Amino acid sequence: MATSRTGTATYLRNRRRVLNQARREGLTHCPGYTDPRGVHHPCGVELDYDTPLLPNSAEADHVVEVRHGGTDDVHNLRVLCRQQNLERNRHVAPVPVPLATDFPTSRVW
C-alpha cells in the first residue's frame, strides 16, 4: 500500500515550521493566492491556528504543486486558510501532455 504524500515526515516537519513561523511573524489574516494566470484572489479572513478543518483554519499550501514538480521544502510552502486552499486546488490547470510527434521513432537498427 502506498503511503500518503502529505503524511511523510519531511512534509509534516516543514508544515509545522511554516505555520509556526507565520504565527511568530504575526500573520493573522489569510493573504490569498495568485493563480497561474496572474490573477490575485484576496481573502482576508482571520486565521485560526489552533482548530483544524474549519474554513478559516491555517493550512500549509504548496506554491508549486508536487504533481507539477514542486517539493515539500519550506520555500515551497505558504500559509492559506482552508477555504482558499480548497478553492485554489479546484482550479488547477491540467498538465500539458506532449504530442506523439514530439517523440520521433525510427525502425532503423
Image (tube, rainbow, N blue to C red):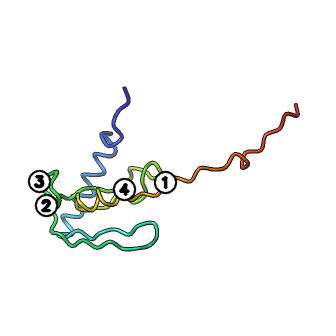
- Tell me: residue 61, above or below residue 45: above
Q: Amino acid at mark 1?
A: Pro
Tell which circle, 2 or 1, labels the residue nearer the N-terminal end: 2
Spatial CA distance of label 4 from label 2 is 19 Å
* In the displayed structure image, the side of residue 74 where residue 20 appears, left or right: left
The residue that appears at 21% across and 73% down in the rendered structure is 44
Q: Which residue is mark 3?
A: 51
| Image quadrant in which you'd find residue 91 | bottom left
The residue that appears at 30% across and 39% down in the rendered structure is 7
Query: Element type at marker 1?
Result: loop
Which quarter of the rendering shows the C terminus? top right
Tell which circle, 4 or 1, labels the residue nearer the N-terminal end: 4
- The residue nearer to you, when weighing 17 against 106, is 106
Residues at marks 4 and 3 touching, judged by CB atoms closer than 8 Å: no
Q: Which residue is mark 2?
A: 48
Characterize the local packing of mark 4: few (<14), some (14-19) or many (20 or more) Cα atoms within 10 angstroms.
many
The residue that appears at 36% across and 56% down in the rendered structure is 62
Spatial CA distance of label 4 from label 1 is 16 Å
Q: Which residue is mark 4?
A: 62
Q: Which residue is mark 1?
A: 94
Q: Amino acid at mark 3?
A: Thr
Which residue occupies the extreme right position in the image? 108
Characterize the local packing of mark 1: few (<14), some (14-19) or many (20 or more) Cα atoms within 10 angstroms.
few
Q: Is residue 26 visible?
A: no
Q: Amino acid at mark 2?
A: Asp
Q: At which x and y percent is residue 79? A: 27, 61
- The residue nearer to you, when weighing 109 against 97, is 97
Q: Amino acid at mark 4?
A: His
Spatial CA distance of label 4 from label 3 is 20 Å
